[in-house]
Image: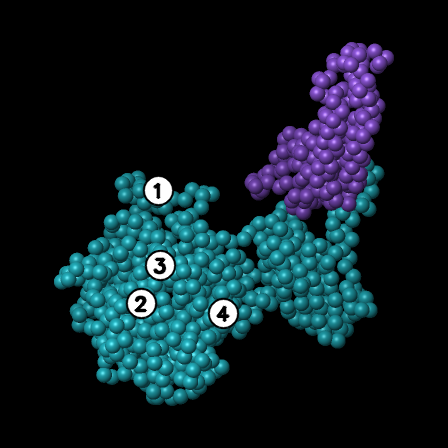
Chain colours: A purple, B cyan
């Protein structure tokens, strides 16, 4: 497979370093930003009820939502229920650390590893969110006051559940890691194109073209 | 006008009014209405507030002997809510919980006459509404943040019939009130034969704490035994002054309708409240019933009297604070005084030779500007801020619009009345938007009529009062709507909606009630066997109480602190005990205390009385009152009651944690 050469700018070590550190920064910032949210609107709540999920806690009109959900036998939402809220901040921090280390050693395999780890965390996040949505909508208490058909709220987009129109959306806490992943990918691309230690080789080489044979 | 011709004109007017009423009757076939045209269409559009739309003004009107205050929207005139003040109101549980029961004391009614909103710089600031109780000498403060009665002060000592109230000074330093009936001070007994000398009236300065609104009796001025009627505070140049009308300057007893209507003139009291505040610390005072009472004869500069047309009723100060308008019920004029002239007469000691109990009487001619012939039975005056005054005419059932000074020399007084509108019928007070402030809005006016016969579906002999909405923005007054109200509106405050900012629930973060609980596992019931009391913290939320069962022994005093833990508007919960005549209602975020003696054995359900949710009907519990001699089964040795449902109700959290998976249940 022939790889499209990365733009020269990306091959500069200082740029790669900056991008990886920026990725780490974005990952750290994401710990403090909402990942995902859901707004529930009905005639009684025209201003909407909100649930906002941060990597470390869940907030919004949770008390009210729990009060309403109780009627259909849904589990109450509270922070301690979710293992994810303990895992995710650590995972984000670990990914940020991978990027920082990558910025120092700048090796393609390390970048690849970081990227795979990010994909892993992202995949876990999406899977667990999907699982939780399914769990909350399907594991309804059989002793609930009202019996409704089990349902799975959508991860993104709108839906109607009883009298509530729900609107779900991803937020900055998911966007920033995505951008961070893009940055690491870009660096990996350049690293794959230029070898693992472009700066030292460049010191010996006359031109970029001379670097090519060294790769093999 | 002599009394014969007055009586004749009253009779003639009554006849005319009746004829007019016949002419205006609704069609005989209900539902058959003619198409709206012209002015009718305009009026309908001007008052129509579409469902879901908001009115422009809050109308706070007093409920007279119902003891309550009502809130309506203007221009729709729709009644929105009743604020209970001096009488129990099961609708909001008022008068059943400990706090409101303590406020009401032993009284079960009051006679609310004159609501007055708090002011900053002479205009409404939307903080509090003060209302008087004419019957039991009290005054109440409603907090406009939650529209709840928060304090009832009184009975005010040395006061009998707190009618000339509530007059708020320009920055709410004081509420000035005057007693209607004169009696011996401090509740003493003196024979009625000694009325003229031993009976006294009083004007009181009720001090208002500027941060909390808490009222306290500051000082009182002892007055001659006249009947003080209505008052007004000054503004602008007359800022430090207040004015009251009186009747019965004859100091008569017996049939006052005759005995008090003998003199041609009665008096307005002209009081300098700043001087009274100063005099209250001086020597010219006595302490009566725990209050510093100033003798105005010995404290110069505190009080003057000013003659005014026979048996006056209302006295009002125009927005500039320069003109004082007084209406003689039995004299068809509104008398305008100039404050500058009053001041000058005082400075020059331009007094009548005869004093009243040592109080100087200002010469009428030195203070008066004009007697404006407004019509028959003038009572109250309000203003539009554009140089016009509006005076209600009780006998004539009309409102006169007339021009305020300055007047040209030799002006024809009749020409000052520029417009007149008929009302239905027998108007008492009237109110214009921000009409008693320094900055009236000059758009709406409401006539508060004492009668409404023939204007509504017949509801039997107990007839409602009527309130009629009139626009005053144009050259001519136009009546655009009428509504019928609970007994018995006297005065009102018409306040723009931008000024009032109420909350929708009590935020948990602000709760300072040490008995408040915010989670079901905070619920706790303990019994003190020695004191025979059971005290509990009860948690209320959709759709259950925690605990759902409370056990007490017959004869125990039950004290329940119930928290409505909701943080959502409209989620109100009640707590009614069947058969025990108890119902309290908690707004979202509110904690209230219910206290009663469980004197009858049996099982008494308690339930939510305010429809709260789809499972409202299920929101209930049982109060077990164990007969004497039968042992309580739910208490441990330390007197703590075991709450059975606690684990389940701790949240659905605990319940769900223990729950078997759905599939394996059957």
Identify which residue is drawn at 74% across, 26% down. Answer: A14
Counting from the top left corner in percent of width and height, residue A19 is at: 73, 28
Query: From what the image shows, is residue B406 above or below residue A161?
Result: below
User: Image quadrant for the C terminus of chain B?
Assistant: top right
Chain identity of mark 3: B
Circle 1 sits in a helix, a strand or a loop, which is it?
helix
Q: Mark 4 or mark 1: which comes first in sequence?
A: 1
Counting from the top left corner in percent of width and height, residue B46 is at: 35, 44
C-alpha separation, residue under disc 3 versus residue under disc 1: 30 Å
Q: Quadrant of residue B463?
A: bottom left
What residue is shown with label 2?
B315
Q: Which mark is residue B45?
A: 1
What residue is shown with label 3?
B438
Callout 2 and callout 3 share a chain: yes
What residue is shown with label 4?
B215
C-alpha separation, residue under disc 2 versus residue under disc 1: 35 Å
Chain identity of mark 2: B
Left or right, B541 with reference to B631: left
Circle 4 sits in a helix, a strand or a loop, which is it?
strand
Of residues B306 and A151, the one nearer the viewer is: B306
Determine whether label 3 and label 1 are within 8 Å by CB.
no
């Amino acid at each position: 497979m022939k790889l499209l050469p990365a733009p020269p700018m990306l091959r500069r070590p200082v740029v790669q370093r900056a991008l990886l550190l920026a990725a780490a920064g974005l990952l750290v910032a994401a710990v403090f930003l909402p990942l995902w949210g859901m707004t529930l609107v009905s005639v009684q709540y025209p201003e909407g009820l909100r649930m906002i999920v941060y990597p470390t806690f869940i907030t919004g009109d949770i008390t009210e939502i729990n009060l309403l959900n109780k009627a259909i036998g849904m589990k109450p939402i509270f922070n301690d229920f979710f293992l994810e809220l303990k895992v995710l901040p650590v995972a984000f921090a670990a990914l940020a650390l991978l990027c920082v280390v990558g910025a120092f050693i700048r090796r393609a395999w390390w970048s690849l590893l970081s990227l795979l780890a990010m994909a892993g965390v992202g995949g876990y996040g999406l899977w667990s969110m999907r699982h939780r949505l399914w769990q909350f909508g399907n594991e309804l208490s059989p002793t609930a006051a009202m019996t409704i058909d089990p349902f799975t709220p959508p991860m993104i987009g709108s839906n109607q559940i009883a009298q509530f129109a729900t609107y779900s959306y991803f937020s900055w806490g998911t966007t920033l890691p995505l951008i961070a992943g893009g940055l690491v990918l870009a660096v990996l691309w350049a690293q794959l194109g230029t070898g693992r230690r472009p700066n030292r080789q460049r010191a010996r080489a006359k031109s970029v073209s001379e670097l090519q044979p060294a790769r093999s | 006008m002599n009394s014969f011709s007055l009586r004749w004109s009253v009779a003639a007017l009554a006849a005319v009014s009746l004829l007019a009423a016949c002419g205006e009757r609704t069609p005989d076939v209900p539902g058959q209405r003619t198409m709206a045209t012209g002015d009718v269409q305009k009026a309908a559009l001007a008052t129509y507030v579409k469902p879901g739309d908001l009115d422009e003004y809050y109308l706070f009107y007093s409920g007279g002997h119902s003891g309550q205050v009502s809130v309506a929207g203007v221009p729709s005139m729709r009644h929105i809510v009743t604020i209970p003040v001096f009488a129990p109101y099961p609708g909001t549980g008022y008068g059943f919980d400990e706090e409101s029961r303590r406020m009401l004391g032993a009284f079960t009614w009051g006679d609310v006459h004159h609501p007055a909103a708090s002011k900053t710089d002479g205009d409404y600031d939307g903080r509090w509404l003060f209302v008087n109780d004419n019957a039991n000498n009290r005054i109440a403060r409603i907090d406009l943040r939650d529209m709840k009665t928060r304090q009832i002060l009184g009975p005010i000592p040395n006061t009998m019939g707190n009618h000339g109230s509530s007059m708020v000074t320009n920055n709410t330093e004081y509420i000035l009130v005057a007693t209607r009936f004169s009696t011996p001070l401090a509740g003493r007994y003196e024979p009625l034969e000694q009325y003229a000398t031993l009976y006294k009236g009083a004007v009181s300065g009720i001090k208002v704490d500027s941060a909390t609104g808490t009222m306290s009796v500051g000082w009182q001025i002892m007055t001659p035994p006249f009947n003080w009627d209505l008052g007004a505070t000054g503004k602008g140049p007359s800022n430090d002054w207040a004015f009251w009308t009186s009747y019965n300057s004859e100091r008569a007893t017996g049939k006052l309708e005759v005995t008090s209507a003998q003199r041609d003139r009665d008096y307005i009291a002209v009081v300098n409240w700043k001087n009274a505040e100063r005099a209250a610390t001086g020597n010219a005072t006595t302490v009566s019933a725990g209050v510093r009472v100033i003798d105005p004869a010995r404290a110069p500069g505190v009080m003057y009297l000013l003659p005014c047309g026979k048996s006056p009723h209302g006295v009002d100060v125009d927005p500039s604070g320069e003109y004082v308008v007084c209406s003689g019920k039995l004299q068809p004029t509104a008398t305008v005084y100039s404050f500058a002239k009053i001041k000058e007469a005082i400075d020059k000691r331009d007094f009548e030779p005869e004093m009243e109990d040592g109080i100087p009487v200002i010469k009428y001619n030195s203070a008066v500007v004009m007697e404006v012939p407004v019509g028959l039975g003038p009572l109250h005056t309000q203003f539009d801020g554009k140089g016009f005054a509006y005076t209600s005419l009780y006998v004539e059932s009309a409102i006169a619009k007339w021009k305020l000074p300055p007047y040209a020399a030799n002006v024809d007084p009749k020409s000052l009345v520029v417009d007149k509108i008929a009302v239905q019928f027998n108007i008492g007070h009237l109110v214009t938007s921000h009409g008693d402030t320094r900055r009236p809005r000059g758009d709406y006016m409401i006539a508060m009529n004492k009668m409404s016969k023939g204007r509504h579906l017949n509801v039997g002999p107990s007839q409602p009062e009527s309130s009629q909405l009139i626009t005053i923005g144009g050259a001519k007054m136009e009546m655009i709507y009428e509504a019928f109200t609970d007994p018995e509106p006297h005065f009102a405050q018409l306040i723009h909606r931008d000024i009032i900012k109420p909350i929708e629930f009590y935020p948990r973060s602000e709760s300072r009630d040490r008995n408040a609980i915010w989670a079901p596992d905070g619920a706790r019931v303990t019994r003190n066997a020695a004191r025979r009391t059971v005290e509990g913290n009860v948690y209320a939320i959709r759709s259950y109480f925690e605990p759902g069962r409370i056990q007490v022994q017959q004869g125990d005093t039950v004290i329940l602190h119930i928290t409505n833990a909701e943080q959502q508007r409209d989620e109100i919960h009640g707590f009614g005990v069947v058969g025990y005549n108890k119902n309290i209602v908690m707004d979202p975020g509110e904690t209230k205390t219910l206290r009663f003696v469980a004197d009858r054995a049996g099982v008494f359900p308690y339930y939510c009385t305010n429809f709260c949710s789809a499972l409202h009907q299920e929101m209930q519990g049982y109060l077990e009152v164990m007969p004497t001699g039968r042992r309580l089964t739910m208490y441990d040795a330390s007197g703590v009651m075991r709450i059975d449902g606690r684990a389940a109700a701790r949240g659905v959290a605990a319940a769900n944690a223990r729950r078997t998976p759905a599939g394996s249940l059957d």
